[in-house]
């Protein structure tokens, strides 16, 4: 079954990645981390935020952007970069099963070269202009759940295993 995937490029704060891992475990979503990371995967804060869900996370770590890009090209699917610089709201994207939802580091966002490689970019609109962005783990959850909602993966009894 093909589902959207979450990609964190150079995440810096362990609890954010741990929270995203927990969301990925809950939704059976692949989590891809692109190094360098701002922490070790053995970090206790990372483990604490992910609680005991790490065994349920389909995790793949890529040593650099080039390795990730090569991996992604072999599998296929669109790159959708989440950035405050986009002109499109995340709800205006028509998500597909094989999309890759990309999120950048907490301090830098996605690299310009990667944003240029994305087929689409999306932002989470902020009505209050003094707030630049949401927490990374919140943003990833918002983007993922919108994609899953559009693709009818969600039902009242939980995630659909065979939505087609």
Image (spheres, rainbow, N blue to C red):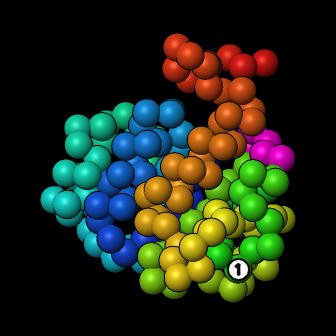
| Majority secondary structure of magenta residues | loop
In the displayed image of the protein, which residue is found farthest to the left?
Answer: 44
Percent position (x, y) of residue 95?
Answer: 78, 45
Q: Is residue 34 visible?
A: no
Percent position (x, y) of residue 68?
Answer: 61, 65
| Residue at horizontal 60 percent and vertical 46 percent from the top | 144
Kind of element beneath mark 1: loop
Does residue 110 lie above or below 93 as drawn?
below
Residue 24 placement, left or right of 125 = left
Percent position (x, y) of residue 123?
Answer: 68, 66
Q: Quadrant of the C terminus?
A: top right
Number of marks present in the image shown = 1
- The image quadrant that residue 83 belongs to is bottom right
Q: Is residue 148 visible?
A: yes
The front one of 72 and 123 is 123
Does residue 97 lie above or below 101 as drawn?
above
Residue range corresponding to the magenta coloring: 94-98
Name the residue beneath numbered marker 1: 85
Residue 90 on the magenta segment: no
Q: Quadrant of the N terminus?
A: top right
| Residue at horizontal 16 percent and vertical 59 percent from the top | 44
Packing grade of label 1 (10 A; few <14, some 14-19, many >=20) is few
| Residue at horizontal 57 percent and vertical 66 percent from the top | 103
Percent position (x, y) of residue 41?
Answer: 28, 61
């Amino acid at each position: 079954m093909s589902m959207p995937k979450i990609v964190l490029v150079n995440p810096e704060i362990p609890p954010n990645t741990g929270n995203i891992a927990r969301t990925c475990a809950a939704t059976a979503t692949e989590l891809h981390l692109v190094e360098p990371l701002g922490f070790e995967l053995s970090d206790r804060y990372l483990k604490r935020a992910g609680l005991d869900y790490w065994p349920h996370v389909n995790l793949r770590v890529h040593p650099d952007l080039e390795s990730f890009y090569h991996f992604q090209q072999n599998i296929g699917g669109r790159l959708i970069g989440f950035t405050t610089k986009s002109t499109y709201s995340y709800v205006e994207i028509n998500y597909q099963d094989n999309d890759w939802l990309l999120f950048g580091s907490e301090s830098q966002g996605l690299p310009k070269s990667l944003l240029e490689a994305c087929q689409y970019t999306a932002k989470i609109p902020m009505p209050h202009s003094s707030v630049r962005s949401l927490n990374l783990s919140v943003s990833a959850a918002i983007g993922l759940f919108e994609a899953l909602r559009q693709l009818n993966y969600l039902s009242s009894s939980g995630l659909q295993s065979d939505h087609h």
